Amino acid sequence: MKFSYNWLNSFFKEDLPQPEKLAEKLMMHFFEVEGVEKKGDDFLLDIDILPSRASDCFSHLGVAGEIAVILEKKVNFPEIESDDGDLESVKVEVENNHLCPRYVLRVIDGIKVGETPEFIKKRLEICGLQSVNNIVDITNYVMLEMGQPLHSFDGEKIAEDKIIVRNAEPGEKIETLDDDKYKLDESVLVIADEEKPIGIAGIKGGKGSEVEEETSLIYLEAANFEAKTIRRTSKKLKLRTDASARFEQGLDPELAEKASKRAAQLFEEYAGGKTVGRVDFYPQKRKPGKLKLSLSNLKSVLGTDIDKARVKSILKRLRLNPKVENDSVKVTVPTGRNDLQLEEDLIEEVGRVYGYENIDPKVPRAALTGPETNYDIFWEDRARDVFKSLGYNEVYNYSFINVKTKKLFGFNDNLIEMENPVSKEYQFLRPSLIPGLIKNVKDNEKKFRNINIFEIGKVFGKENEEKRKLSGLKTTDFRDLKGDMDVLLERLGVGKASYKTIKNKKSFWSPELAEIKVKQETVGLVGKISKDFLKGMKIESQIFLFQIDMDQLAALASEKKQYERISRFPTAVRDLSALVPKRINYEEFVSVAENAGGELLVDVDLFDLYEGEKIPEEKKNFGIRLFFQAEDKTLSKEEINELLEKIISTLEKKSGWEVRKK
């Protein structure tokens, strides 16, 4: 907002510091000065007044008051004298005093519209307003000086000598002073006479009641309007003025009478008028507020001990009428200080006036403790990191499924149905993450050669039960997926998992299904999606998928690390395939191989599980990869072959087990 340096200076007996120095003082104790510009024999200060201080600092007197506080000077307020009596010949009717808490109407007769005094012209122009005539210029001058917008009506053009503040009627129209026409509705507050609207309240005057060269009788309006109403109307009509900018921030009702007196005084002095009287509608007078400031709280918040007398002096300069009582100070908050609502507001006032630069910096004395770890989120994030490092992409699917998906995946009737679903596609809460992941493959398989995705999310069971699940899939092969499971469990500190084949009870799984077991506890499933199921969904890719209970996984996970020395010697790898009876699970098969291999067999991976063509009906084929390694030497070919033969002979001793030879 623009302020004249010379105008501000006129309120003090002694000259203010030079503009640049004054700007520095204001920035240290008040608001930011965005620029200082020389304008002829004056300087223009562009001060960023925040909305919290709009009620008392959108004016030269308001800023002068702040300068007086900062520099410990006295402001010479303009002397305003008036002995106006109440006026009965003119009526004011306010239909809603919530929207218009105060309306002051002064009647000034004998006005002569003409030239404006030069000093008023200069002050208006430096603040960006053009001179019109002495009547318009004086109302603008008082607005810039005191912060209260004013408006002058030609009294002889007001029907029935009556001013009505009301809401517009639906479809009512008005033409403003700048020849723009507006269609109004009941949300717009207007100033009207008995016949028509003559102004948009707090924003713009209407055509037909304006002051002209022959005007001699003026109705001077100084009102207070509800801020929200003015803001909404200004936005609705796309009409913003200097008046609306002030009203929409909330003004002090007490300011209306003071500004009206000041303007009437200037009219009498520079326009030859004489005040006849006034009407003051003010049914509920706003009372000053009361606040209490604890000196111990002041010290605690600011971090410094300010002398009690100094605190009182600062509050007195702020015109808060302080009264010291032991360790506290009681103050009276002027009606124009809308920003002072809490004790903390008073502390801020004392701090800024005292000067934050005068407060010695101190290192806070406190025990710093880290936030408590939320392990649900912690292990979810750790799992995300693992899968992203393995080349997976995370997906986020909706938590809803429809009837078609329910039937397709064979979900039971215990699904939770939404009372008011957004659409039929979002009828049930999902009981599994799998449908969403498979749909992701269907939607994207033509765009990507391989798809590796995972999702962590909630699934919902009967009786509003919620569980966290981790599911993912690959379109490559089962061995890769199993290896990824092992990496996940290792990095989460869960330990080594075993895989137990089970009979498939879900229509979308193929027979190649295994439980993921950790410490004899089942934490999930891993397997392949049925070819027939994928064909029915028109999916060409093969899908290998896992599903893990995230709550169980988090309970088993550990941040503790156990150091194991890495052998300096190479690993030897051999593959082995064996036919076993269908009743034999993978865990039992691998256990036999591991016992036979001893300590030099460091790992066993399943790379194939096959049943079907060229395999006896009662048999299945396990393909395993054996990893041999010693800690103290490189194993020779003979040693490896000897271990391999031992494993083969042990396996073949089992009834119905046969190691396949190439």
Image (tube, helix red, strand yellow):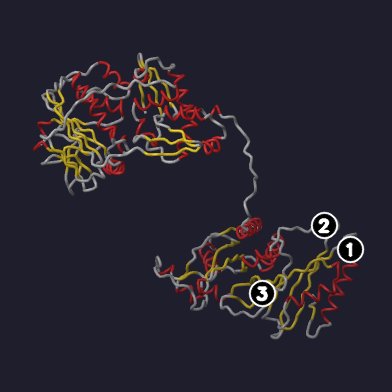
For the residue carrying disc 3, how many other residues have a C-alpha within 10 Å: few (<14), some (14-19), or many (20+)? Answer: many
The reply, left or right, for residue 12 in relation to residue 230 is right
Amino acid beneath label 2:
Ile
The residue labelled by disc 1 is 635
SS type, badge 3: strand
| Residue in the picture at 11% in, 41% down | 194
- Please provide percent x and percent y for residue 215: 12, 26
**Which residue lies under the disc numbered 2?**
566
Cα distance in 3D space between marks 1 and 2: 16 Å
Q: Residue at x 89, y 65 (%)?
A: 637
Task: Name the spot of residue 424 as percent of width and height, x first.
Answer: 41, 69
Q: In the rendered image, which quarter contains the N terminus?
A: top left
Q: Tell me how far mark 3 sits from mark 2, CA to CA.
A: 31 Å
Quarter of the figure with residue 97 = top left
Foreground pick, 203 / 287: 287
**Label 2: few (<14), some or many (≥20) within 10 Å?**
few
Residue linked to disc 3: 514
Depth order, front residue of 105/574: 105
Q: Give the answer, above or below, for where 154 lies relative to 186.
A: above
Q: In the picture provided, is 76 more to the left or to the right than 408?
A: left
- Name the residue type under label 3: Ala
Which tag, 1 or 3, sits closer to the chain's start? 3
Label 1 is placed on what type of residue? Leu
Pick whichever of labels 3 and 2 is earlier in the sequence. 3
The alpha-carbon separation of the residues under discs 1 and 3 comes to 34 Å
Relative vertical location of residue 400 with respect to residue 222 in this rendering, above or below: below
In front here: 43 or 621? 43
Closer to viewer: mark 1 or mark 3: 3
User: Does dot 2 land on a helix, a strand or a loop?
Assistant: loop
Pick out the residue farthest to the front.
Answer: 326
